[in-house]
Image (tube, helix red, strand yellow):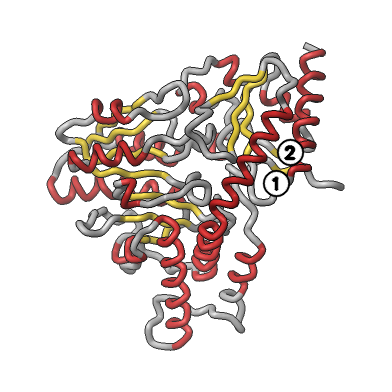
Amino acid sequence: MKKPVYLDYAATTPVDPSVAMEMMKYLDPEGVFGNPASRSHGYGWQAEAAVENARRQVAELIHADPREIVWTSGATESDNLAIKGVVGQRSSARGLKSHIVTSVIEHKAVVDTCKWLENHGAEVTWLHPESDGRVAPQAVVEALREDTALVSLMMVNNELGCVTDIAAIGALLRERGVLFHVDAAQAAGKSPIDVASLNVDLLSLSAHKVYGPKGVGALYVRRSPDVVIEAQIHGGGHERGMRSGTLPTHQLVGMGKAFELAGECLEQEMVYLESLRSAFLSGLGELEGVHFNGSREYRVPGIVNLAFEGVDAESLMLGLRNLAVSSGSACASATVEPSFVLRGIGLGDELAHRALRFSFGRYTSVTDIEFACSHIVDVVRRLRAVR
């Protein structure tokens, strides 16, 4: 049986074959299987060297110092460590409650973390984005208070693909001495990232969005001057005391290799994905009543969010049995409620219920796009005819 065409790269990417091959070298008895924290023999030294090489590979993609990379289990943990870590440090060091600024369309890892902190004494200002899904720099500045400890915003929205002006916001916050955390899980490998020019203090990364393995990520923590955060996982003082736990060498090697590949082919892939996007939208041009959600100008090329008049998303997905697509974030797919992101940009419930996210990647072919367009047009017309 032929597999459905995969157009859900924003949910996860397949592991690049060269990444998988590299990971296998760190698993079996013939490979480098030692504990990186074992400093008394060669097995541990070899594993530690592999971990530090991977740290360098990740750092190079975002133009950071390798010493600024803290390993985590993924972007969700990185978001938690960054946000709770700043608030916890502020409370422990100065006994102060914290004010946080974020937006209503952030990833659930940020939204739920901020809600948890609200329930534990922190105050949160929830910004509403512009109708194109981007958070305006001026809105961030107007939300700041004397007790603002942190601003947390995503670089690329995971449902819309739109890109917020992180550099402009970062510059304004740096002038005011406010820490800035950015979730870049959907940005890495899709657009250039330079943490210095962006003026960010903390930045979350995930391997499985960049053709690496699931279950591993990293948090960039700026040095010089040091950004101090309170650890959320204790038990051995790994990662310079910021995140304890035995490091999974094979996963870190996989993330490092994936990020190295992403850096090597970034420009080429951006051009390729842009061509796929153009072909996709052109192929759907014959359909009436299609609404484009998010910024058409400020976005990454691989994510497209569309609402189809007269067809609800659940019925459309059932009809599109030969396509793997999403009605929103994979982290919120268990709910039948309209996407909180689409509601957050002002879309009414009716259109929000009719929206699907299509996302392309490294292994999407022109033939896949042609098939997808034909399939979507056919199913949408058929569903509209039986209303």
What residue is drawn where x is 18% and y is 39%? 176
**Snapshot quadrant of residue 254:** bottom right
In the displayed structure image, the side of residue 339 where residue 6 appears, left or right: right
* Residue on which disc 2 sits: 369
Q: Is residue 292 visible?
A: yes
Q: Secondary structure at mark 1?
A: loop
**Residue 55, x across and y down, in percent:** 42, 66
The residue positioned farthest toward the bottom in the image shown: 41
Q: Report the amino acid beneath label 1.
A: Thr
Q: Nearer the viewer, residue 128 or 156?
A: 156
The residue positioned farthest toward the left in the image shown: 94
**Residue 210, x across and y down, in percent:** 55, 53
**Residue 64, x across and y down, in percent:** 35, 59
Which sits earlier in the primary sequence, circle 1 or circle 2? 1
Look at the numbered discs 1 and 2 and tell me whether their residues touch, using CB distance below 8 Å.
yes
What residue is drawn where x is 24% and y is 54%? 227
What residue is drawn where x is 50% and y is 70%? 249
In the displayed structure image, the side of residue 292 where residue 108 appears, left or right: left
**Residue 235, x across and y down, in percent:** 34, 65
* Residue on which disc 1 sits: 364
Whole-angstrom CA distance, mark 1 to mark 2, is 8 Å
What residue is drawn where x is 81% and y is 13%? 385
Q: Secondary structure at mark 2?
A: helix
Crowding near the residue tagged with mark 2, few <14, some 14–19, many ≥20 C-alpha atoms within 10 Å: many
**Rendered-image quadrant of the C terminus:** top right
The residue positioned farthest toward the right in the image shown: 1
Q: Report the amino acid beneath label 2.
A: Ile
